[in-house]
Image: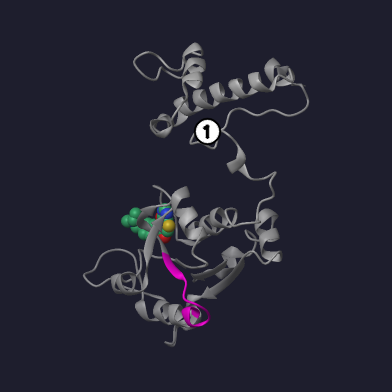
Amino acid sequence: MRFDILTIFPELFASPFEEGILRRARSNGKIRIRLHNIRDFAVDRHRMTDDRPFGGGPGMVMKPEPLTAALDAVQAEDEPGRVVLLSPRGVPYNQRIAERFAGCGRLVLVCGRYEGVDERVSRSRIDEEISIGDYILTGGEIGAMVIVDSVTRLLPGVLGSDESAESDSFSRGLLKHPQYTRPRIFQDMEVPEILLSGDHAKIEEYRLVESVRVTLKRRPELLDHVQFSARERKLLRRAGLLSAKGWADAD
Ligand code: 9D3
């Protein structure tokens, strides 16, 4: 998979791709990341990438010419990629979109800055606009990092079988159950007895119940899309998590 990132701050990307799974994916050749400085495509004397908004108002708008020239140059290098603009007015990013992007082969990530990009560029050159959530950032660069990270780990052969969370039975739309490792007692706090018992059936039951408990408390809306078997419903009812009417309170 190839990622091209268009930004006025390429230096921001110095370290995020240099460690861990992303570094390994790059050295394995599973992904290739190319950074492009939009300013290099500005031809005016001051190499300006922004200008004042027509109609007035605060802030600046990303000028169309440098961004369009950058997109033309980058798209000419290879088979054209899908062009994604990171923008606070984009569609909220999620795992389904990450999975779709992982099938794209090439993504061109455009990092918005200032108040946004000229609408004529969005209309003519951008395939989709993505936001990474309902909070205000200073630009799209961190969003581009989020997309590279989340898409890369979905690519075939990037995660070892050990790292692949999708094999986990609780990646069925529930939050992860609590996890523990050694020591058995840490600052007077013990590991739940059941996890030390070696009874794998009981451990799976405990984990399901705890997954549902934490999901109900923090992300109750996720439970609308989860199906439970009759056996599981019985366990959950016993734990007081599933009342006759529907879901009970988390604690
Ligand atoms: C005053 C209106 N603001 C829109 C909410 C202006 C504005 C805020 C922040 C315009 C641009 C930005 C910069 N943000 C991004 O480029 C951005 C972003 C974000 O702010 N939140 C979540 N996802 C993203 S992706 C790109």
**Camera sees residue 228:** yes
Number of numbered markers: 1
| Farthest residue, direction left | 55
Residue 26 image offset from top left, x and y in percent: 67, 64
**Relative depth, front residue between 99 and 61:** 99
Q: Examine the structure image and report whether residue 98 is included in the region drawn in magenta.
A: no
Give the residue pinned by disc 1: 175
Rendering quarter of residue 195: top right
Q: Quadrant of residue 82?
A: bottom left
Q: Residue sitting at 49 percent across and 17 percent down? A: 236
Rendered position, 86 above or below 228:
below
Relative to 88, 17 lies left or right: right
What segment carries the magenta color? Answer: 74-84
Q: Is 81 above or below relative to 155?
A: below
Which part of the image, by quadrant, shows the N terminus? bottom right
Residue toward you, 169 or 85: 169
158 sits left or right of 233 in the view: right
